[in-house]
Image (cartoon, grey):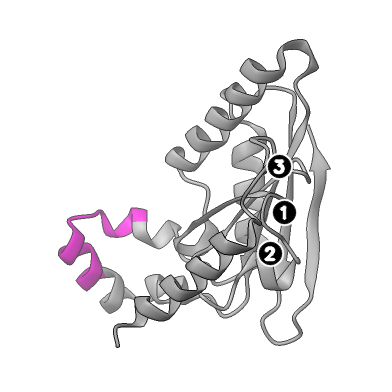
Amino acid sequence: MPPIDALLTRNREFAASGAHADVEIIPRQQAMIITCLDFRVDPAAFLGVGHGDAMVLRNTGGRVARETIEEVAYIAHLFEHIGGDQAPPFEVAVVHHTDCGTRFLADDAFRESFADLVGAEPARLAERAVTDPAATVRADVERLRTSELLPSLVTVSGHVYDLATGLVETIADASA
């Protein structure tokens, strides 16, 4: 049986439960979580994020690239469009983690071979490596905070999820 079949069975159970009904466009926790696509880093598991609680944006390393900023700006613009002057504030929580697979981008041979594969600049790929998650989360929080694309209704915080302990440490408190 293909791996997706078990997941599709779970989908039918989910649909039959009705849990998808009446979920609003603005999440209950008024939060967006930006984190890594690593399967060990699931906000539903380590933060208890339930259906309709928060927006979750996952990418390699949970890094904040130009495209990520544009995604956050889109959500902020949407909130402003829906809410007008009453637009609810929301927090963007950037969460990096220990033992991130992007650490291999710090290895010259791996980075060069991957750069050749995808036609990327090796130096740009080196910047994406998460070898010190506290440092990279600080840099990504600063990148969001200084973006001219984000309105004042957006606050940004930074955190590190420790795979060994299961705990999340706040590195940068939320601020406008």
Q: Earlier in the sequence, mark 2 or mark 3?
A: 3
* Helix, strand or loop status at disc 2: helix
Q: CA distance from mark 1 to mark 3?
A: 19 Å
Task: Give the number of the mark in front: 2 or 1.
Answer: 1
The numbered mark at residue 27 is 3
Give whichever of 29, 33 is nearer the camera.
Answer: 29
Q: Crowding at label 2, few (<14), some or many (≥20) Cα neighbours within 10 Å?
A: many
Q: What percent of the width, then of the height, locates residue 109?
A: 26, 78
* Residue 105 as seen in the image, left or right of residue 173: left
Q: What percent of the width, then of the height, locates residue 112?
A: 23, 69
35 lies above or below 84: below
The numbered mark at residue 134 is 2
Task: Identify the residue at horizontal 36%, vertical 76% (top origin).
Answer: 4
Task: Kindly identify the amino acid type of the residue bearing the numbered disc 1.
Answer: Gly
The numbered mark at residue 158 is 1
Task: Give the number of the mark in front: 2 or 3.
Answer: 3
Q: Earlier in the sequence, mark 2 or mark 1?
A: 2
Task: Kindly identify the amino acid type of the residue bearing the numbered disc 2.
Answer: Ala
Give whichever of 4, 21 is nearer the camera.
Answer: 21
Among the 4 quarters of the image, the one containing residue 146: top right
Q: Which residues are magenta?
A: 112-124
22 lies above or below 101: above
Task: Kindly identify the amino acid type of the residue bearing the numbered disc 3.
Answer: Pro
Task: Identify the residue at horizontal 72%, vertical 72% (top origin).
Answer: 46
167 lies above or below 141: below
* Residue 72 as seen in the image, left or right of residue 174: left
Q: What percent of the width, then of the height, locates residue 76?
A: 62, 27
